[in-house]
Image: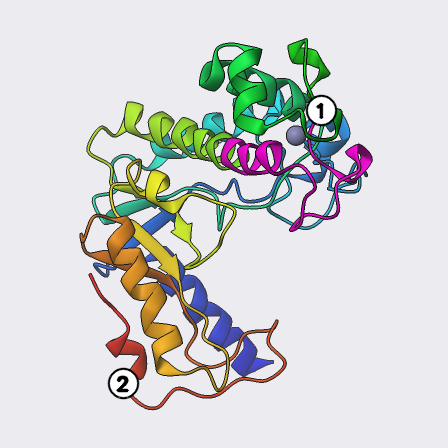
Amino acid sequence: MKSWNKSRTAAITTRSSVRENGLKVCMAASTGAHPAWMAKKYPDILRVDYEGRKHKFGGRHNSCPNSPTYRKYAPLLAKKLAERYKGYDNIVAWHISNEFGGECYCENCEKAFRTWLREKYHNLDALNTAWNTTFWGHTFYEWDEIVLPDLRSEHFDGERTMFQGISIDYRRFMSDAILSCYVLERDAIKAVIPNAAVTTNLMGFYKPLDYFKWAKEMDFVSWDNYPANGDNYTKIAMPHDLMRGTGAQEPFALMEQTPSCQNWQPYNALKRPNVMRLCFIW
Ligand SMILES: [Zn+2]
């Protein structure tokens, strides 16, 4: 009991003296998961998956990017945090959400998809030509005839499709929709702290998001590196190279890695001494 009290006291002392001890902080905006009360009160924030199932509360990375609730409250929380911590000169960067990704097939996303398509193609003739909709009778005559390419619209699965044009545009749309959420939070922080350095953690070769487009909206690129045991060093080096490239050859930050184990890998290899330090590229 005595030793527990001692360690607990030490932890509290450490927590309360981050700034006093000159430690630098990358402040996260806390929006990577919505709370249970919000899912109950505003069900539009819950995603619909590829099979058309409306999700219940749980997990993280679970907010619909076109939910009015999410798009209102996520930047509001980021703004409140910025207002509270704007005087902390040891905060060197701000971090939006966490590992943005996933997809949603809800009705709000379907409406937003049509808006995105109108802005891209301007008229249905151009869209029908680009998508080669004469194939299997897919021609569209009204914008609201277009539905999201999920299992309910007879697509093979999330990775394979029988209607390529709409599938690739849905991916581009979803990347833009999620990116717009990042931008909302980034701008909310910058409205309070104009010179804040804002980023989010990318995931190497994660395919669903167009990281080249994302990097243009980030003050610096950062990413999470979790090599599996036995990975060839070239497989680890290549995403580092990609991250540098997405930032137009600018330096990037390694936002996440672990010195030993991750709870989601079947087994892990300990890093040799000083290998952690090797990985920091700034
Ligand atoms: Zn949605």
Who's the residue at 46% across and 71% down the image? 226
Residue occupied by mark 2 = 274
Residue occupied by mark 1 = 138
198 versus 226 height, above or below: above
The residue segment tinted magenta is: 147-173
The span from disc 2 to disc 1 (Cα, nearest Å) is 58 Å
The residue under label 2 is which amino acid type? Asn
Image quadrant in which the N terminus is located:
bottom right
Front residue of this view, candidates 4 and 71: 71
257 versus 55 height, above or below: below
Is there any visible trace of residue 42 in the rendered image? no
Task: Locate residue 11 relative to residue 191 in the image: left or right.
Answer: right
The residue under label 1 is which amino acid type? His
Who's the residue at 49% across and 43% down the image? 30
Is label 2 in a helix, a strand or a loop? loop
Residue occupying the far bottom of the picture: 272
Say few, some or many: other residues with alpha carbon within 10 Å of mark 1 (under 14 / 14 to 19 / 20 or more): few
Please state which of the two labelled residues, at mark 2 or mark 1, is closer to the viewer. Answer: 1
Front residue of this view, candidates 87 and 106: 106
Numbered circles on residues, count: 2
Residue 45 x/y as whole percent: 67, 30
